[in-house]
Image (cartoon, helix red, strand yellow):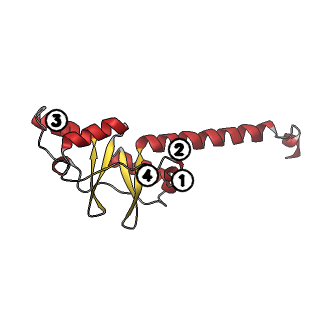
Amino acid sequence: MKVREIFEAKAAALHTATPQQPLTRAIDEMAEFDVGSLVVMADGRMVGMLTFREILKALRAHGSHIDGMTVGEVMIDDPVTVFPEMEINELRQLMIEKRSRYVPVLEGEQLLGVISFLDVAKAVLEEQGLENRMLKRYIKNWPEDKATLD
């Protein structure tokens, strides 16, 4: 299975912010849309990622005094990215090694969307379920006298 297959199976909504956007507004949007990340865009291209991890770090560093802070001050400015033809096992390994729960998918310079660790887990479960059903069907239809033919 490839990243493209996971990406095509999920909803296409892409939530974004700008580096100049107030951090409090970005937090409100993340809560409203129930998402754990925003792609930070400037001049039509991705310049970073904001995840709940960066927000928690900002809150820890500044207490509850984040008024006046911008997305650009706390975002990841060089996020891990993947390409659509990457194999899912390679993606899982990368996400674990880099501790990235949200990974932008790029085709060249074009941002296609974001894959979350939850998206990957769902895809793996669905694939395993399909394989399990196919194996059960195969075993169920196995000729009883097959063992004597070998």
Q: Residue 33's x, y, as percent? A: 36, 39
The residue mark sitting in front, 2 or 4, is 2
| Mark before the other along the chain sequence, 4 or 1 | 1
Disc 1 to disc 2: CB gap under 8 Å: yes
Whether residue 116 is situated above or below residue 77 in the rendered picture? above
The numbered mark at residue 59 is 3
Q: Is residue 53 left or right of residue 2?
A: left
Q: Position of residue 88 (x, y in %)?
A: 49, 51
The number of numbered badges drawn on the structure is 4
Task: Determine the image quadrant of residue 113.
Answer: bottom left
Relative depth, front residue between 149 and 59? 59
Name the residue carrying label 1: 5
Dot label at residue 123: 2
Q: From mark 1 to mark 3, how far is it between C-alphas?
A: 36 Å
Q: Residues within 10 Å of mark 1 (few under 14, many from 20)?
A: some
Residue at 53% over, 44% down: 123
Compared with 140, 47 (above or below) is below
Mark 2 vs 4, N-terminal side: 4
> Hey, what amino acid is under mark 4?
Leu
